[in-house]
Image (tube, rainbow, N blue to C red):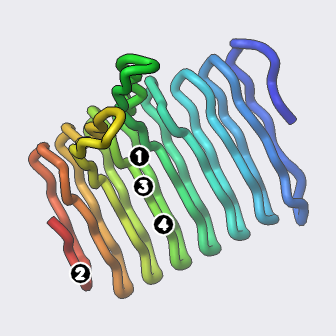
Amino acid sequence: VTFLNNLSNNVSGFDNSNDVINGQGGDDIIEGLSGNDLLRGGAGNNTLNGGVGEDFLDADFPSGNNLLNGGDGNDSLTASGSYKYSSEYGQVDDRSLGNNTLNGGVGDDSLDASGSFGDNLLDGGDGNDSLSISGSGTSQEYGQTNDRSDGDNTLNGGAGDDTLNASGSSGDNLLLEAMAMIF
């Protein structure tokens, strides 16, 4: 399902189904329910709830404040952005501007808010999780990238053997409950 409007939409997937739901503009609430779901939020302040299953929740390049809840299962949640410059295209700044909350829930989850200007909260929950707000500033032959995370972020691994990555982040970050921390 893809919404072809910029209105605020509230939609639920189906139980025991692998749903693919794409939000557009507007403040969307998207519920995946059970199954291995792919949920994408568009522009706006979105809430994506994966439910039970191995879900992929995507709010890449967001300008709004987004809430992503993975639920039970091994989930992947992203609210990341990027900045690139090349002689062909000039400056392309798609860094995340919003203050995002990513909750992994129970399971071995991957949470990523790299390349963000916002103040983000990443909470892995129970399980062996990987949380990242990393960024980089590199030069390439035909351009340069600067995907640094600039916000003041909180990464909480929760119970389990977790890896928290804040390398290339210039914000004041708080990293809690981790087996490994990368700066």
Residue placed most toward the observer, 177 or 113 = 113
Q: Secondary structure at mark 4?
A: strand
Q: Secondary structure at mark 1?
A: strand
- Look at label 1 and name its amino acid: Thr
Task: Give the spatial CA distance, label 4 vs label 3.
Answer: 7 Å
The disc, 4 or 1, on the residue closer to the chain's N-terminal end is: 1
Q: Which residue position is annotated with label 4?
A: 110
Q: Are marks 3 and 1 in contact (CB under 8 Å)?
A: no
Which mark, residue 112? Answer: 3
Residues at discs 3 and 2 in contact (Cβ within 8 Å): no
Residue 160 rendering spot, x and y as whole percentages? 38, 86
- Judging depth in this view, the residue of 148 and 6 nearest the camera is 148
Q: Against 111, is 61 above or below?
A: above
Q: Which image quarter is the N terminus in?
A: top right
Name the one closer to the observer, 98 or 141: 141
Mark-to-mark CA distance, 3 and 2: 16 Å
Q: Whole-percent x and y of residue 66?
A: 48, 36
Q: Position of residue 15 (x, y in %)?
A: 88, 60
Whichever of callouts 3 and 1 sits on the residue coming sooner in the sequence is 1
Q: Which tag, 4 or 2, sits closer to the chain's start?
A: 4
* Left or right of residue 51, residue 110 in this image: left
The residue at which mark 2 appears reads as 180
The residue labelled by disc 1 is 101
Quarter assignment of residue 40: top right
Q: Earlier in the sequence, mark 3 or mark 2?
A: 3
Residue drawn where x is 18% and y is 49% of the image: 169
**Where residue 49 sits: x, y (%)?**
64, 50
